[in-house]
Amino acid sequence: MQKVTAPGVIYRARDFFNKNLFEGKLSPIPIYLINQAPCTGGAFCYDSIRFDEQRIAFLRSEFSYGTRVSDYIMLAHELSHQWHDPEGGHSQGFIKTMEAIGLTYTPYGDHVIRGGAFEKWCEIWMGGRILAA
Ligand SMILES: [Zn+2]
């Protein structure tokens, strides 16, 4: 599987969201762009076979290099996995973590909760650009 390290803007966004949404408690983690499955969108992976590390992987075809809010929704989704339980999947606990940071999980795509923490901090991160509905 071809993979490259994600651009610096995504690492900086990760630090920003860690600080503002997760109390700065998440450990540093590698973030990669990959060209094909196993993940759709973003995927928190624990690859014990080759890398023996936790990592976040974004599918390159769905990634917009930090220009769209969808990148940050994916990032926050994966950070919620890291926060809650890396191997727990989309459990009730994971869903509660997502809601606590201002996102609603659905199997078909996550939604921003109006007035929630994610909306506030993502707007600040993106320079005040209004989030798409
Ligand atoms: Zn997930």
Image (spheres, rainbow, N blue to C red):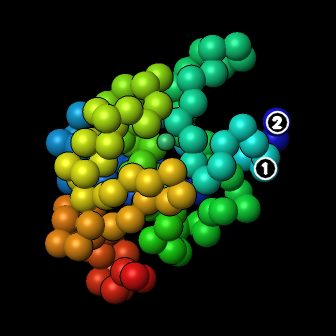
Q: Nearer the viewer, residue 14 or 8?
A: 14
Q: Position of residue 96 (x, y in %)?
A: 25, 42
| Left or right of 19, for residue 28 | right
Instruction: Identify the residue shown where x is 50% and y is 59%.
Output: 109
Instruction: Identify the residue shown where x is 57% and y is 41%.
Output: 43
Which amino acid is tagged 2? Answer: Met
Q: Position of residue 62 (x, y in %)?
A: 66, 62
User: Where is the C terminus found, in terms of image quarters?
Assistant: bottom left
Mark 2 to mark 1 CA distance (whole Å): 7 Å
Q: Earlier in the sequence, mark 2 or mark 1?
A: 2
Residue 27 appears anywhere in the view: no
Instruction: Identify the residue shown where x is 34% and y is 86%.
Output: 130
Mark 2–mark 1 CB contact (< 8 Å): yes
User: Where is the N terminus found, in terms of image quarters?
Assistant: top right
Which amino acid is tagged 1? Answer: Asn
Q: Secondary structure at mark 2?
A: loop
- The vertical placement of 13 against 53, above or below, is below
Q: Position of residue 44 (x, y in %)?
A: 53, 36
Q: Which residue is mark 1?
A: 35
Q: Secondary structure at mark 1?
A: loop
For disc 2, the neighbor class at 10 Å (few under 14, some 14 to 19, many from 20) is: few
Residue 106 lies in quadrant: bottom left
The residue most toward the right is: 1
Q: Which residue is mark 2?
A: 1
